[in-house]
Image (cartoon, grey):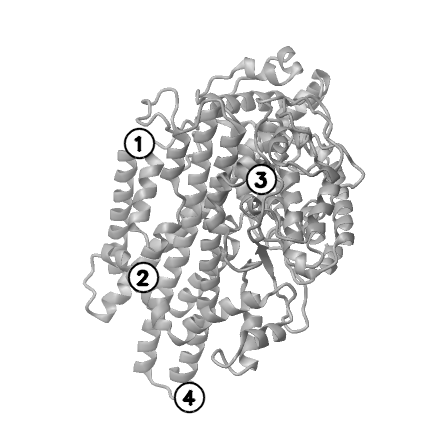
């Protein structure tokens, strides 16, 4: 992680979820900064995860690491799980990032570049979509997720030399109409595709993007959901600013999307991402950063006197733009000098909770009581929300685990399966899983997802997806409603 | 359309300035109706574009609110400290009444602040649920498999990274506990239990009227043909 910290001094990682490392933008070495985030959790095994939820997500990350994948590629039903070889993808990533950073010259294009990098990151992790939906578009490419076979090409894509971009498959076809200089077409991975050539030499594409140094295609800002990624880095002035920001790239022409599409569907999101201004970045503030901000403001004589420029200079946080400071300063002034307004809204908002209280609010004691009750309700809601959130995360985790298991089983042979069927294990450690069970679960889950049938386990689905499936009838039929019993957390 | 109803109610009851910031669930469902059963890449691309727009909207709002909370939290802390320093026992001009008054105001503000933060947490949750559901509907309608990978991506979005928010909430609770310790009086406890039971009863009745959030083969068929069938995890209802 230290290495990455040097690369991106100003950014801190709030959460090392790979999916989110589409940004770390704004740095001159934008793309490279995103990659460390990507690799960090996997390499460091999430040492930084402060909470269980993050730990859970971190665990999820491992399974979803990109890795070289070989094997059958299902077509439309190919909900292929990822293959987990944690190391390979990231070495590729780093290679990619370094190749990117070499090409970067100017910080002025950093948002642009980081956008590009975020493209790649999301693409890398989004291969699953592109595989899963054979006709999915480049948009779907940008959605991070786990992926099956597609990951290999992606990983290799990140190396300039690689020409194999099977992950691009159909989705890319239709919508990433790369100019000629982009280069070679990808290998075919068995997915039915469009007629368009697969120009998915990401290295060349990156070159082209960076070379343009103009606005990114308008659609990208819509397509890409940048998330935050940052590394904690001590700063001279601000001790541990955790600066993470999202950078949206401004609107621009869409040379690389098929003309029929470019104007059309992304116009929906254009307004929302049409920030009007140039390179309007989405900053994610943290308390530490805010402290730094406040110190700077105080040094400059208070919130009324301080100017955004002065504060920016004093804070010395890389990646922070004057725009960020300006809007934050505005909020700060509002909060300070008109606290009645900030809190006043809250009064109205909380009225309904007060209404719930059956107490007469005339005396101070009763007001106190009402407040206490209000607080109780809020605390309970908070508890419930946390529980629900954890459950949701677990559910997704299980879903991925099942897929992964299924994928592994379909790739391995029956012998391997038998060898692997053993005691329960941690979901994030695939090799110990009970594959037959998971396959059953997976097929059950699949059928649920696909057909809205409920609990029936459908052999045909299994057979469709893997050859070994047909020879290997599920050893156990679980109640679909109880997947957790077979897979330990 | 259980979730849709719930979302609608939530939006109705929510803070005015939040009303437009929730996921446009109903609109997305309408869009789904226009899709054919075989999905075209174009349609899928458009759908994804819509989703992205929603996610961006949610992210932006969430981050804005979070930033506000960070600022307000600091301000509250400063206020507390200055109140203690000024009117407190060892303060510059100790005055119990003024201290009490100031503290009462702070208490009210803190409770509201806490509430808003919890509501933002809820906002995050509600929208995530909506996204999951609309993705499920999409998969069902088109027979494709957009949900799993897409939802994974969603999981990485800022609006679902609620650790900071959680932390702020817990700090707020701690501070409240320190400043305004809750004595468990007999009367208070009784009233509180009544109140709680009332609220719980209301919630239960609501839930019962809305039916189960999961369906098993033995459940009544859903009213809406786009109802949820995520019965695999029936033990873990997603509300």
Callout 1: few (<14), some (14-19), or many (20+) C-alpha neighbours within 10 Å? few
* Residue A372 image label: 2
* Residue B175 image label: none
| Gap in angstroms between the C-alphas marked 4 and 2 | 30 Å
Q: Chain of mark 2?
A: A
Is label 2 or label 3 in front?
A: 3
* Residue B211 image label: 1
Residue under label 4? B92
Q: Is residue A275 above or below residue A481?
A: below
Callout 4: few (<14), some (14-19), or many (20+) C-alpha neighbours within 10 Å? few
Q: Chain of mark 4?
A: B
Local secondary structure at mark 4: loop
Q: Residue at x 64, y 47 (%)?
A: A118
Is label 2 or label 1 in front?
A: 1
The part of the image, by quadrant, that contains residue A439 is top right
Q: Is residue A380 above or below residue A300?
A: above
Query: Where residue A126 sits: x, y (%)?
Result: 61, 37
Query: Where residue A14 sits: x, y (%)?
Result: 59, 55
Along the polypeptide, which appears first: circle 2 or circle 3? 3
Q: Residue at x 33, y 33 (%)?
A: B1
Whether marks 2 and 1 lie on the same chain: no
| Gap in angstroms between the C-alphas marked 2 and 1 | 32 Å
| Gap in angstroms between the C-alphas marked 2 and 3 | 44 Å
| Gap in angstroms between the C-alphas marked 1 and 3 | 34 Å
Front-most of residues B188 and B101:
B101
- Whether the residues at callouts 2 and 3 have beta carbons within 8 Å, the answer is no
Query: Where residue B72 sits: x, y (%)?
Result: 44, 67
Q: Chain of mark 3?
A: A
Residue under label 3? A143
Q: Kindly give the residue lying farthest to the top in the view shown.
A: A471
């Amino acid at each position: 992680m230290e290495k990455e910290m040097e690369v991106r001094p100003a950014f801190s990682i709030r959460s090392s979820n790979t999916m989110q490392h589409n940004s770390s933008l704004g740095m001159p070495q934008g793309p490279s900064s995103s990659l460390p985030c990507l690799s960090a959790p996997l390499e460091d095994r999430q040492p930084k995860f402060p909470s269980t939820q993050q730990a859970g997500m971190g665990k999820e990350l491992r399974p979803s690491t990109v890795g070289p994948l070989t094997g059958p590629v299902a077509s439309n039903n190919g909900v292929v799980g990822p293959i987990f070889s944690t190391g390979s993808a990231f070495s590729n990533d780093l290679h990619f990032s370094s190749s990117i950073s070499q090409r970067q010259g100017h910080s002025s294009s950093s948002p642009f570049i980081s956008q590009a990098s975020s493209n790649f990151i999301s693409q890398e992790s989004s291969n699953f979509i592109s595989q899963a939906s054979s006709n999915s578009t480049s948009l779907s490419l940008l959605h991070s997720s786990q992926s099956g076979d597609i990951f290999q090409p992606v990983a290799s894509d990140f190396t300039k030399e690689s020409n194999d971009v099977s992950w691009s498959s159909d989705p890319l076809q239709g919508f990433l109409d790369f100019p000629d200089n982009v280069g070679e077409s990808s290998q075919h991975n068995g997915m039915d595709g469009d007629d368009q050539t697969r120009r998915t030499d990401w290295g060349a594409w990156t070159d082209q993007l960076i070379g343009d140094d103009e606005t990114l295609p308008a659609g990208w800002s819509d397509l890409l959901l940048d998330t935050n990624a940052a590394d904690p880095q001590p700063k001279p002035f601000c001790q541990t600013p955790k600066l993470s920001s999202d950078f949206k790239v401004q609107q621009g022409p869409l040379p690389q999307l098929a003309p029929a599409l470019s104007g059309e569907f992304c116009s929906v999101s254009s307004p929302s991402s049409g920030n009007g201004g140039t390179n309007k970045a989405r900053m994610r503030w943290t308390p530490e950063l805010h402290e730094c901000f406040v110190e700077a403001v105080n040094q400059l004589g208070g919130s009324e006197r301080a100017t955004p420029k002065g504060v920016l200079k004093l804070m010395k946080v890389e990646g922070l733009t004057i725009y960020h400071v300006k809007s934050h300063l505005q909020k700060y002034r509002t909060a300070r000098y008109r606290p009645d307004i900030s809190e006043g809204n809250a009064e109205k908002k909380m009225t309904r909770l007060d209404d719930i209280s059956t107490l007469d609010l005339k005396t101070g004691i009763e007001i106190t009581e009402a407040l206490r009750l209000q607080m109780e309700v809020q605390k309970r809601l908070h508890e419930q929300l946390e529980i629900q959130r954890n459950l949701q995360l677990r559910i997704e985790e299980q879903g991925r685990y099942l897929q992964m298991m299924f994928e592994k089983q379909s790739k391995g042979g029956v012998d391997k399966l038998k060898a692997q069927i053993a005691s329960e294990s941690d979901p994030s450690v695939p090799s110990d899983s009970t594959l037959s069970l998971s396959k059953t679960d997976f097929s059950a889950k699949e059928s649920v997802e696909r057909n809205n049938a409920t609990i029936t386990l459908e052999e045909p689905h299994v057979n469709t997806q893997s050859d070994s499936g047909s020879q290997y009838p599920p050893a156990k039929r679980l109640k679909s409603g109880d997947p957790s019993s077979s897979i330990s957390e | 359309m259980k979730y849709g109803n719930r979302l609608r109610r939530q939006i109705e009851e929510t803070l005015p300035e939040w009303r437009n910031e929730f996921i446009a669930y109903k609109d997305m469902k309408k869009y789904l109706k226009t899709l054919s059963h075989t999905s075209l890449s174009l349609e899928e691309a458009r759908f994804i574009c819509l989703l992205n727009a929603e996610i961006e909207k949610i992210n932006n709002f969430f981050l804005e609110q979070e930033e506000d909370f960070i600022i307000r939290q600091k301000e509250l802390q400063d206020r507390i400290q200055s109140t203690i320093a000024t009117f407190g026992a060892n303060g510059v001009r100790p005055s119990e009444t003024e201290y009490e008054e100031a503290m009462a105001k702070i208490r009210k503000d803190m409770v509201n602040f806490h509430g808003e933060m919890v509501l933002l947490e809820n906002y995050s949750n509600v929208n995530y649920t909506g996204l999951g559901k609309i993705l499920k509907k999409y998969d069902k309608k088109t027979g494709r498999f957009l949900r799993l990978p897409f939802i994974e991506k969603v999981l990485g979005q800022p609006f679902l990274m609620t650790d900071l928010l959680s932390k702020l909430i817990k700090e707020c609770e701690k501070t409240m506990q320190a400043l305004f310790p809750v004595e468990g009086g007999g009367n208070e406890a009784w009233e509180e239990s009544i109140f709680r039971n009332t609220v719980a009863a209301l919630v239960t009745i609501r839930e019962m009227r809305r039916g189960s959030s999961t369906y098993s083969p033995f459940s009544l068929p859903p009213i809406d043909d786009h109802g949820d069938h995520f019965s695999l995890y029936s033990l873990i209802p997603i509300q």
